[in-house]
Amino acid sequence: MDDKTTVNELKEKIKKFCEERDWDQYHDAKNLAIGIITEASELLEHFRFKSEKEVEEMFKNKDKRENISEEAADVLYFVLRLAQKYDIDLTAELNKKLEKNEKRYNVEKFKGSNKKYTEY
Amino acid sequence: MDDKTTVNELKEKIKKFCEERDWDQYHDAKNLAIGIITEASELLEHFRFKSEKEVEEMFKNKDKRENISEEAADVLYFVLRLAQKYDIDLTAELNKKLEKNEKRYNVEKFKGSNKKYTEY
Amino acid sequence: MDDKTTVNELKEKIKKFCEERDWDQYHDAKNLAIGIITEASELLEHFRFKSEKEVEEMFKNKDKRENISEEAADVLYFVLRLAQKYDIDLTAELNKKLEKNEKRYNVEKFKGSNKKYTEY
Amino acid sequence: MDDKTTVNELKEKIKKFCEERDWDQYHDAKNLAIGIITEASELLEHFRFKSEKEVEEMFKNKDKRENISEEAADVLYFVLRLAQKYDIDLTAELNKKLEKNEKRYNVEKFKGSNKKYTEY
């Protein structure tokens, strides 16, 4: 399986994994949000005190690259589980957000800028 | 668009959004990991000091539910951007992780348990 | 040394520790903020998927209690280092914040409430 | 009040603030850890996508500096509240940690290095 897979297929796979283990009882939104942020922190921890150059070097090292990719998948796992459990269509939400940001981050004004739209 | 969309299609959409704004220069892995964790925190913030019952009530309120779903999409946005920018196949990684966890969280041993595999 | 120590004395101790290792070059505010959040996550990770009752039990277990306390100190370490490095008087800031919150969280209105002041 | 204040005095002040509002019922360790990480994220958010130079510039701007300092105090508030509520001596813990790190981060070996002790 690769990224030609649909979001729904991923949700289904995770649903099956969790239900086989009878984890619905622990997977309320609050605990899943804790799951997301703690995995996000393990991802970020790789880059603590590292310069931009050192970060780029990491991705050239096969093992390091693999570790980082695994952390990204750990975050995704909990995002998908939250969406599956609470019936959230992530693609629809993402599209709504991109449309909102199309306006907030107007190309002409924000091209090449690292400002937040609230900073203007 | 809905969750019948593939991960690759989402990555492409986000790539286009960011490249139109010339944001490649800011979207190194360290900053994207910061993006992921800060959005994860906005999601979690909804549940701070709330009981399990209050959390479930939130999802019955249309506006609250919409706000929470939007935060989940914000996390996903940065996960997909990281994967797109650094050429990570999220589905492949997720599968590898699920296979690893199939063993770590053996169904017979962990069914109905909230223990971490390292706690055994 | 115990909590009869002043904040300034703690800052001084940490300053010495870091300067002996020549770490000023890595301890910019962005990296220290990453330090704070990654340690905060290690603290939170102890409570992932745990019920309120299980959390209270943890503090009765000497080793578990010690681990949790250590994570709290790790967060404090980076908060103090940030304050020392950027010349922030934490006590003064904390007082300003408490005064602000005295009004935001008016006792009469918020006694026994878990609402955020923005929710009213 | 300034940083010549002791940790105990700060804990007492926060205890009083929270007890007046009858918040003990919400301030279990799990929710306080969520408090710490969500405030840590608000601090980090200031530095998202910002270069080292831009971060240093922020501290020269009075308002920006004040906002950042306030976020640091927000993190500290929850760390102190956790310590007060669960009877943790933060100074003692910090000292134990510094002693442990004296060995892990041996001056001779780690002077000027941004490596984690586990990377050696």
Image: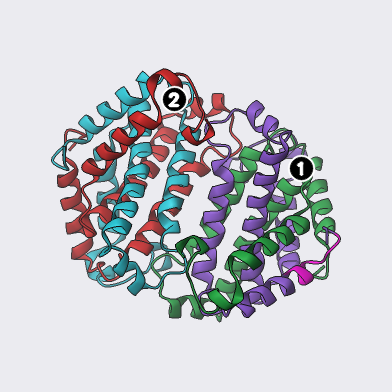
Chain colours: A green, B purple, C red, D cyan
Residue closer to the observer: A48 or B30: B30
Q: From this viewpoint, is residue C74 visible?
A: no
Q: Relative to A33, is D19 on the left or the right?
A: left
Residue closer to the observer: B38 or C71: B38
Residue B38: x %, y % from top left: 52, 55
Region of the chain picked out in magenta, as a range: B4-10
Residue closer to the observer: D101 or B108: D101
Q: Is residue A117 above or below residue B111?
A: below
SS at badge 2: loop
| Mark 2 Cα shell of 10 Å, populated few (<14), some (14-19), many (≥20) | few
Q: Relative to A88, is B55 on the left or the right?
A: left
Residue highlighted by disc 1: A85
| Mark 1 Cα shell of 10 Å, populated few (<14), some (14-19), many (≥20) | some
Q: Relative to A63, is D57 on the left or the right?
A: left
Amino acid on which the number 2 mark rests in the picture: Lys
Residue D34: x %, y % from top left: 49, 40
Task: Classify the position of the C terminus of chain D by image quarter.
Answer: bottom left
Give the numbered dot on residue C16. none
Give the numbered dot on residue C60. 2
Identified at 78% across, 47% down, the residue is A84
The numbered mark 2 sits on a residue in which chain? Answer: C
The number of numbered discs placed on residues in the rendered structure image is 2
Quadrant in which residue D118 is drawn: bottom left
Residue A25: x %, y % from top left: 72, 32
SS at badge 1: helix
Identified at 26% across, 28% down, the residue is D13
Residue A61: x %, y % from top left: 55, 79
Query: Residue B53 colored magenta?
Result: no
